[in-house]
Image: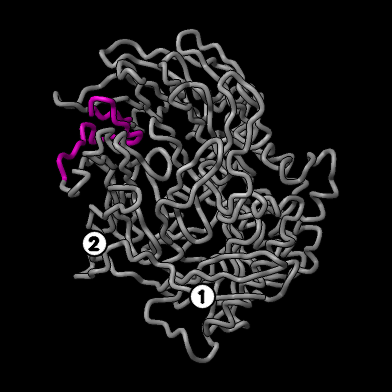
Amino acid sequence: MRHSLGIACSMLLATTAPAIAQPLHQFSGLAFARAGDRVATVDSASEPDAAAEGRGIIVLRDAATGRVLSRLDPCPACSYSGLSFGPAGQLAFIARDRKAGTATLMIHDAAGVRKLASVQGLAAEPRWSPDGRSIAILATVGARKETGATQAGAREVGEIGEVNDEQRIAIVRVSGGALRLVSPADRFVYEYDWTPDGKGFVATTARGNGDANWWVATIDAIDAKTGAVRTIAAPGIQANFPRVSPDGRTVAFIGGLMSDFGSVGGDVWTVPFAGGTPRDATPGYKGSFTSLDWDARGLHAAALKGDQSAIVEIDPASGAGEPVWSAGVSLSAGDGRVAFSQSGLMATVVQDYEHGPAIFAGPPSQPRQISHDNDGYKPVVVARSLTWKNEGRDVQGWLLSPRGAAWEGPANQPMITVVHGGPAAASTPQFVWQGSTAALIGAGYWLFYPNPRGSYGQGEAFTAAKKRDFGGGDLRDILAGIDAVEKNAPIDDNRLGLMGGSYGGFMSMWANTQTHRFKAIHAAAGLSNWISYYGTNGINTWMTPFFGKTMYEDQAAYWDVSAIKYISQAKTPTLITVGERDIEVPPTQSVEYWNGLKAMGVATSLVIYPDEGHGIRNPAHVADVRRRSVEWFDRYLKGQ
């Protein structure tokens, strides 16, 4: 086993620390003007663990200096999203009034702000036509729920499966007029891009329930006038970020063994716009591409390479080049990880575990920090990247300690291992300032975030290593990572905790039946029985690429990795939390595990939160989870 510890915090972010700046400023939905002169974001500010989320307004900044040029808040009852600059510098955005149930497309230009079109339901992703005369959006008229399987599900009563939300491409003229639904009603459109001639779109779509079929979507061409659909490719892998080449001949997309909404990582693939078999343009790449952009200058991507977020140029014929820029940070923008201007500049929001979010802009090889709202927010952790070798694979993770904790000395510190969801995903640096992470750090716990086999960051072969091996090699990688941590930090092996949500919740439930190394567990939205899960969740199409066959064709493969099969081996006290309306991992999975632990005499507590989906969002519920989690670990790791 090889292991090494290295400081991974980026020194790109400002390190000056005057008095703590409260509250923390967040920048979402970043858009970059095509001229490269302005950056737009939705800015909000909240104090840690506030009882309500801070409301955002649109802020436009000078891309060179960060100076605020204007603030837009035309609908005080609305939230804002979907920022998109037009060819003449206009800004389109969506204003959503939840109380009224409407989503309105608005435009800001030299004349001010005006409403262009409204939807009774949901709207997202405004995109300007190449000639700037029209704007397309994704519209869900009469939506029964928020878009995405991670959101709370609609109540299933009456005849099931007969009514589905329909997310469709709609177009409206910038000069005004009615919003016209274009794509057919029997297809749910997930992502899309205009073709360079403005005559249509390339999109990922699927028939039927949009929540259930994200994992089997096809890449299609959609005619802007007639709505006619032509399948370009049924890639057999999950596809994200469909982008059309400037000459209109080729479609590029990120494809891989993905899983959840918004969790993107794979190779870059290309396919003729006329149709054909997709070709992997980056085979063997030692990293995972996370967003994609194609303009006159070429094909650009963001990627995760180990502990580094990188900007990479790609030649569709010869593959990916060396990173233009990389750092141990997380990147975010409104349409992917990075936004590019026509002049070749970039803009993105950067953060890591020790530095709050900040806007960066400039040349891709040397972006500069242009916002400084969070410079005074002092970190509460020290974060280090950890690498180790297990069974011939290089594995990476992050180790966080409370600020001021000694890294040398007796092995007397409690540590909680946090397993990410997915299954295909990665733990990447996010500023620690609130929530369970900050609460556990404040309670004196060290936190370990491993990225075992199956994670993004080290190529598709590494991600695919989890196929038909849930809880096998990835659990061994995690345990080897804990060994590596204990060789480099003062961790008490008798005071180890484990927690995770979704697939991390499964790993928490499963590990309880495979090892007694952990002394306390918190399993959030976990899976305990893959047999019963398969027939009761709302998204079972994601499992076939991992298991090879459906549960009905190969029950043994699903039963063999079910914690319930081995429940008699469980010994560790386990807190279980889940949302009442979770369609990704129904609460029945938690109930089944809870009953199993009780039957075995294992200490356990189950909390089901009303009206929550796959992830707890109500601030009062979030606070309750945080309190219970800290108390559970304190009880069994500290004896309190």
Report which residue position mark 2 lands on.
22
Real-space Cα separation, disc 2 to disc 1, in angstroms: 32 Å
Instruction: Please name the residue shown 78% across and 63% down the image.
Output: 567
Disc 1 residue type (three-letter): Leu
Which coloring applies here? one colour
Pick out the residue farthest to the top: 226
Residue 570, placed above or below residue 337:
below
Residue 607 in sight here: no
Instruction: Please name the residue shown 15% across and 47% down the image.
Output: 67
10 Å neighbourhood of mark 2: few (<14), some, or many (≥20)? some
Report which residue position mark 1 lands on.
5
Image location (x, y in percent) of residue 298? 43, 35
Q: Is 234 contained in the magenta span?
A: no
Image location (x, y in percent) of residue 131? 32, 17
Disc 2 residue type (three-letter): Gln
Apparent side of residue 501 relative to residue 509 in the rendered image (left or right): left
Element on which disc 2 rests = loop
Residue 529 in sight here: yes
